Image (cartoon, grey):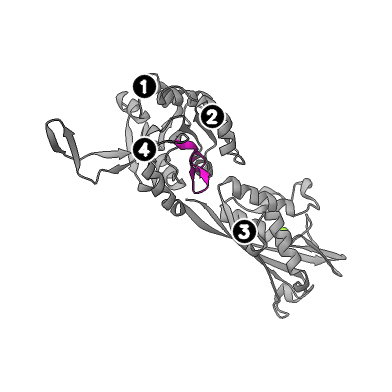
Amino acid sequence: MTFSTLIVAAGQGLRAGPGAPKAWRMLAGRPLLRWSVEALLAAGAREAIVVVAPDRLGAAAEALAGLSGWRAVAGGDSRSQSVRAGLAALSGPDDEIVLVHDAARPFVGAVHVQALIEALAGADAAAPALAVADTLKRRTDAGVSTVPRDGLWRAQTPQAFRLGGLRAALQAGETTDDLALVERAGGRVVLTPGDPMLMKLTYPEDFAMAERLAGAARITRIGQGTDAHRWGPGEAVWLCGVRIDHDRGLVGHSDADAGLHALTDALLGAVGLGDIGQHFPPSDPQWRGADSARFLAHAAKLVAEHGGRILNVDVTLVCERPKIGPHREAMRLRLAAILGLPVSRVSVKATTTEGMGFTGRGEGLLAQAVAAVETPI
Ligand code: MG
């Protein structure tokens, strides 16, 4: 199911205390705005429109450098005007799902998006909400009284709509909550399970708590890759990006570097983006004889575009010959350079199968790889 997203970051955030507007403050080393944009793109947003104050368009480009799939537009004086400006920039048809999100809620994840999209199948709008757990008090000049909390919910964002429906609802007036417009128009609104992690950073102390939670908003994912190539005539073999003189070569459409191919698949696997054959089909003549470092670099770029950070990689080469040991450090250095990692995060190992199987008989070489990647939830 495709969806687009509108991320509203045009507010001043005056309650957050002195300093830059809150969307531009740093949270665990990244601007607050970047957290939501990265997470919603990683969750599959086809297009992300970021609505910022007119004098912040340049700052948005800086805060979101290296990400693709987003555009920034200038917002208006009120939240509704900003949402209208963002909607005008969205290119989708009336029935496309749009998630409207507040940039002050950095810990949005794919799990929230999935629940909203499913809920929207039977509704005009959907939003995550938490039941009110604390006792509610009202303080007036007359004193303090207790407000029944039965049936009260705290609405969070992202809120899900269909583009046409939200455009029509916004004709109706101003609001600080887009869902309210759909309610007023008699639309069917569904609440999905809220999440304390969708907290809105409003006051200075919220930022302190978010710093402590930032680690919990990332998960570690593991990817695995396997590749094999057949031995054939030749005078050298490419393994893990290093050329080794040898009395045979590996047969393949590209340079047949099984180490790089296995590692490319491991990275793609860690972020769930298919396999090397989908991204670089062997039937495509442009990959004939290709330097497989390009495949690995492309996979690393996809990981980064999905908000991921490679933690470490580990490659195992299985063959009787050539001896890998003398080339191991060169291979680690080469892989580290392609991936932009410290060499300490890169491992290359080798083993034989003691004469057994296709590697033992010298019919082919086997490579296996694993990669650990830290990504948004
Ligand atoms: Mg291969």
Amino acid type of disc 2?
Arg
**In front: label 2 or label 1:** 2
Residue 91 visible in the shown view: no
Queried on whether the Cβ of the residue with tag 2 lies below 8 angstroms from ligand 1, the answer reads no
**In front: label 2 or label 4:** 2
Amino acid type of disc 1?
Glu
Tag on residue 158? none
Q: Is residue 33 magenta?
A: yes
In front of the other: 138 or 45? 138
Q: Mark 4 — residue?
A: 127
Q: Which residue is depicted at the point 71% across and 56% down? A: 337
- Above or below, 147 against 278 in this view is above
Question: In which image quadrant can residue 142 be found?
Answer: top left
- Dot 2 and dot 4 residues touching (CB under 8 Å): no
Amino acid type of disc 3?
Ala
Part of the protein shown in magenta = 22-36
- Dot 2 and dot 1 residues touching (CB under 8 Å): no
282 sits to left or right of 119: right
Please state the horizontal and vertical placement of residue 125, each as a whole percent of the image. Answer: 37, 33
3D distance between C-alphas at marks 3 and 1: 49 Å
* Mark 3 crowdedness (10 Å alpha carbons): few <14, some 14-19, many ≥20: many
Q: Mark 3 — residue?
A: 266
Q: Which residue is depicted at the point 36% across and 36% down? A: 126
179 sits to left or right of 363: left
Q: Mark 1 — residue?
A: 174
Q: Mark 2 — residue?
A: 56
**In front: label 3 or label 1:** 1
Amino acid type of disc 4?
Ala
First along the sequence among labels 2 and 1: 2
3D distance between C-alphas at marks 3 and 4: 35 Å
